[in-house]
Image (spheres, grey):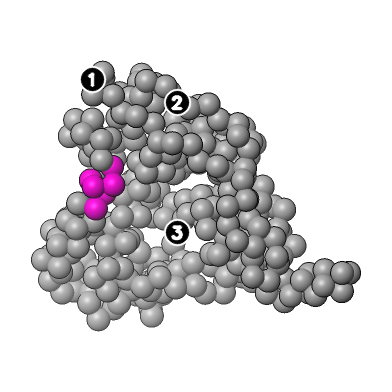
């Protein structure tokens, strides 16, 4: 931490107390060059802000040039990091931040669609998914190979076959007792059971709930999302010998790695060796 940088962070005008607290925490975690290893989960825990809100604020900071995503080697592992643009600290960023944040909020409302109409004016901190459905499509269809083979490994990654999005009824009530909320909690239980996560791990359950809720806004039913998450986790375990870094549960799901194998930290040398070995056996 640099006291000068921390002082400038406090002087930065954002006119958003939540955003200011997140920025100050990142600067406080950063070294003198502005490089911080603090992850979304840690920032959310220390600022008492939901991980979804922290993720959105970080994205806004990146869009205005205040932060830059990076990766650094730390204790023998490649870790994601945030690089603070120290030249922007201490300035009046209220106008540019407000414009970028408003654009991000508008994009979210557009994506949420019918679910947002059921929200009844809730804030970003509300963890309830305010929507109801008449029924949730039956799952258990397994997984389907929908992506092309990995360019080096030659194995097609498996992803669950997604069902049609649930239909949001015109009437009904929204709340914790709604059918969709019950399905959300069941999906969280499904993932926790598959990954051997105890109920006492409330913070981790909250992270998984936020991940599933976010995917639900894209039209996917909770059980199918849970199947995809479990399949991705086991896929990472299966491909462990070909990865330089195996991610933990929080980062794997919280930072969206489970949805995109191209972001995994592949060991290109081992992939080539595996490919050459298969070619030699033909």
Q: Mark 1 points at which residue?
A: 171
Q: Looking at the rendering, which quadrant does residue 98 occupy?
A: bottom left
**Residue 278 on image: x %, y %:** 82, 68
**What secondary structure is found at the residue carrying circle 2?**
loop
Range of magenta residues: 107-112
Query: What residue do we see at 41% from left, 74% from top?
Result: 35
Q: How far apart are marks 2 and 3 (CA)?
A: 34 Å
Q: Mark 2 points at which residue?
A: 136
Q: How far apart are marks 3 and 1 (CA)?
A: 40 Å
Say which label, 1 or 2, has the lower sequence index: 2
**What secondary structure is found at the residue carrying circle 1?**
loop
**Residue 201 on image: x %, y %:** 53, 36
Query: What residue do we see at 60% from left, 61% from top?
Result: 148
Left or right of 206? Residue 274 is right
Q: Mark 3 points at which residue?
A: 39
Q: Can residue 277 be seen in this view?
A: no
**Residue 146 on image: x %, y %:** 58, 52
């Amino acid at each position: 931490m640099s006291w000068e940088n921390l002082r400038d962070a406090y002087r930065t005008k954002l006119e958003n107390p939540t955003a200011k607290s997140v920025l100050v925490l990142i600067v406080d975690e950063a070294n003198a060059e502005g490089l911080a290893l603090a992850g979304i989960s840690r920032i959310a825990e220390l600022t008492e802000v939901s991980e979804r809100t922290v993720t959105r604020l970080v994205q806004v900071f990146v869009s205005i040039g205040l932060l830059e995503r990076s990766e650094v080697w730390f204790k023998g592992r490649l870790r994601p990091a945030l690089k603070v643009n120290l030249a922007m600290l201490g300035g009046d960023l209220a106008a540019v931040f407000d414009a970028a944040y408003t654009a991000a909020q508008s994009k979210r409302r557009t994506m949420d669609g019918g679910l947002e109409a059921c929200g009844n004016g809730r804030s970003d901190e509300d963890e309830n998914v305010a929507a109801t459905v008449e029924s949730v499509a039956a799952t258990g269809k397994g997984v389907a190979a929908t992506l092309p083979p990995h360019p080096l490994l030659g194995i097609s990654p498996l992803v669950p076959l997604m069902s049609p999005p649930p239909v949001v009824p015109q009437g009904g009530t929204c709340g914790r007792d709604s059918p969709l909320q019950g399905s959300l909690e069941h999906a969280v239980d499904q993932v926790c059971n598959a990954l051997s996560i105890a109920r006492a791990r409330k913070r981790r359950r909250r992270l998984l709930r936020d991940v599933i809720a976010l995917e639900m806004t894209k039209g996917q039913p909770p059980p199918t999302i849970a199947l995809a998450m479990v399949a991705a986790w086991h896929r990472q375990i299966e491909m462990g010998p070909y990865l330089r870094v195996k991610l933990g549960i929080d980062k794997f799901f919280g930072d969206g790695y489970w949805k995109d194998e191209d972001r995994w930290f592949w060991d290109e040398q081992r992939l080539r060796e595996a490919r050459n070995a298969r070619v030699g056996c033909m």
